[in-house]
Image: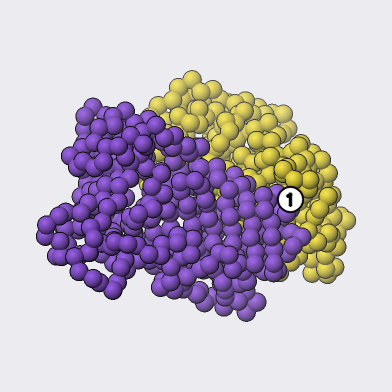
Amino acid sequence: SDEFWFDPNEKGLALRSVNSSRSAYACVFFSSMFFQHYCWTAEPELCQKKRQSPLTCKLIMKSVLPVFRCLNTLERNVEKCNIYTNVNDCHITFKLFCKHGIIKTHNLAFHESEPLQAVFSRHMCPNVLKIQSRLLTDVMIHFPTCQEEVTVAVTPMKVCFKSYTEEEIDFSKAMHTKIHLNPDEFDYFQIGVDSEVTFCLKELRGLLAFAEATSATVSVHFDVSGKPIAFSIEDMMVEASFVLATLADIENRESSQQSLCLSQRQKRQKITDLISSKKKSQEYCVCTTTHFIKYCIFQFHSLFFGAVSFKEQDVISHTLHSLATASDAEDDFDNEQLSHVV
Amino acid sequence: MFFPTELQTTTLQAKLFCPVLEVLGSHLLKLYPIGVINTIAKLAKTCTLRLTVDKLYFILTDKVANGGVSMWCELSQGNFFDEFQMEGVAAEHNEIYLELTPENLSRALKTAQNAKMVKIKLTNKHCPCLTVAVELPSLSSSSRIVTHDIPVGVIPRRLWNDFREPSVPDFDVSIYLPVLKTMKSVVERMKNLSNCIVLEANLNGEMNLKIETDLVSVTTHFKGLGNPPWVSEDGSQNSTQDRDPESMAEARIDIRKLLQLLAGQQVNPTKALCNIVSKRIVHFILLHEEVSLQYFIPALA
């Protein structure tokens, strides 16, 4: 997709994106504990405003990606990454501290925008599966990379993943693949309603790569065909979730893809009330409010583009640059083990 | 053992679709057959699979659509499958000819690399299919089953004559090929300069690969390759014995076809040679332990 939502808030940083047809939504939430140092401050409003919403920055994907390109180089060279948001001139600054004293600074302009969230409540889904990421990848590997859509058919006794071909395409040309799994293979298997849902595999591959890198368990929540299916990973510090639309009616082979409404908040995040909220730059004349975030290595690139690796590197220098915030806060995080199993 | 119900169908509609094929292998699918099928997948988009009681053949006939190239690849089934059960169209013609996309087969077999069991059957679902069922080890009590349905076309007996084994042409020179990897990198570089390449060789074990354009001509020389001894069927000496050993036989061929052949090689063949019929055709023969691959590239006008 083209756009990328960058939402820092009190609890952590949320990154979101949606594809152009609005049939796939991805959200990754990094809790403040993920970072070596996370500081989110907001000035109290100068005047009362009815709408209290956190700062939501919308960036162009193409401008963000080059910052984190070349993952191998990043891992080798970058010691620290600082991310600052400057509301006054609508910029996000990524400062990469590399070896040999090189500092790369990227300033990206953003638009303020409405937060992007999908209408989907996981706990309402009758079907829930939890599967090791390794196993899920092993299953998906049997489908060719060009396979667009995959159907998952479940009954309380079995699970089957199969390739899906649209009727217009000549059946006699396409190869069909089916994978049968036993419910035993799942860490958690709950099927409330027999269903067959078809979703776009391509959109999922990014999450699969990320899941494999973190060796996490993938939770799958879904309902009947037509309702969205969600794949999510939850960790102590990171939560990633991909919500995909499914084909409405398999029997009649209507390929009407439902688009996800983007008005309601996603329940999981529980971003309800924020005491203070960000305001537009014009209204601040006195203080510059900045969000100050420091990372070890951050590769959100992988989530959206299927590149693998999510590593942490030892941070050599802990010195803060320019913007000073509570240094005690920094000390708290110094010794924290950010564990991400690769 | 849990098998999905479709696989239990072995009898097929009698009139329209007679052939029966059931193949079972467990520790089969060593590197070679998969490698060969991958090679074939790179050479041809569709090809014919001929099954007889002892052998499998992948055939590509020299149609215009292929650019005149043709291919004949032979494998003995005994080396790969534990059980091979086949019933052709009729008793005296115990063979099956199928048209398929080799890439599909190659993909399906990729699944089978760590399999406990592989079962290949000819089935008839929405259309005739080669169903490859792979039983994979899994963490749970029952195995994981992966099924691939590869659509195939059954070729009727009246067309079988189109797929006869090509005879070895009356060549002018026969020579062993240089190390394929080296040859491939040379040809790859040359491909950027020209669409045609001249392949010439003599009975002194020398081969040259040449390209010529208005601006540049490049030649790569290979020496000491050796010439395979050929004996004709009646035991008489080969006509090439009379030939001047220094004299080059040459053919100008499409470089992309040559590159397709070289690039597709995944395992180094035991023997690799080519027979050149001057200005007519180049016949490549690649032999692996249990597989033989012949590839014909016609000379350009």
The quadrant of the rendering that contains the N terminus of chain A is bottom left
| Residue A299 vertical position relative to residue A121 in the rendered view, above or below | above
Residue B24 visible at all: yes
At 38% across and 55% down in the image, what residue appears? Answer: A14
| Position of residue A85 measured from the top left corner of the image (x, y, whole percent) | 24, 52
At 44% across and 34% down in the image, what residue appears? Answer: A337
| Position of residue A144 measured from the top left corner of the image (x, y, whole percent) | 56, 53
| Position of residue B180 measured from the top left corner of the image (x, y, whole percent) | 50, 31
Chain at numbered mark 1: A
Colouring scheme applied when the structure was drawn: by chain
Q: Disc 1 marks which amino acid?
A: Asp
At 46% across and 48% down in the image, what residue appears? Answer: A238
| Residue B141 vertical position relative to residue B161 in the rendered view, above or below | above
| Residue A274 vertical position relative to residue B226 in the rendered view, above or below | below
Q: Nearer the viewer, residue B270 or A163?
A: A163
* Chain letter tied to purple: A
Q: Is residue A262 left or right of residue A58?
A: right
Q: Nearer the viewer, residue A318 or A200?
A: A318
At 47% across and 52% down in the image, what residue appears? Answer: A239
| Position of residue A306 measured from the top left corner of the image (x, y, whole percent) | 45, 49
Q: Is residue A22 left or right of residue B46?
A: left
Residue occupying the far left of the picture: A285
Residue B153 visible at all: no
Label 1, residues with CA under 10 Å away: few <14, some 14-19, many ≥20: some
Residue occupying the far right of the picture: B91
Element under disc 1: helix
State the residue position of label 1: A184
* Chain letter tied to yellow: B
Q: Nearer the viewer, residue A307 or B228?
A: A307
Kindly indicate the quadrant of the structure image that contains residue A246: bottom right
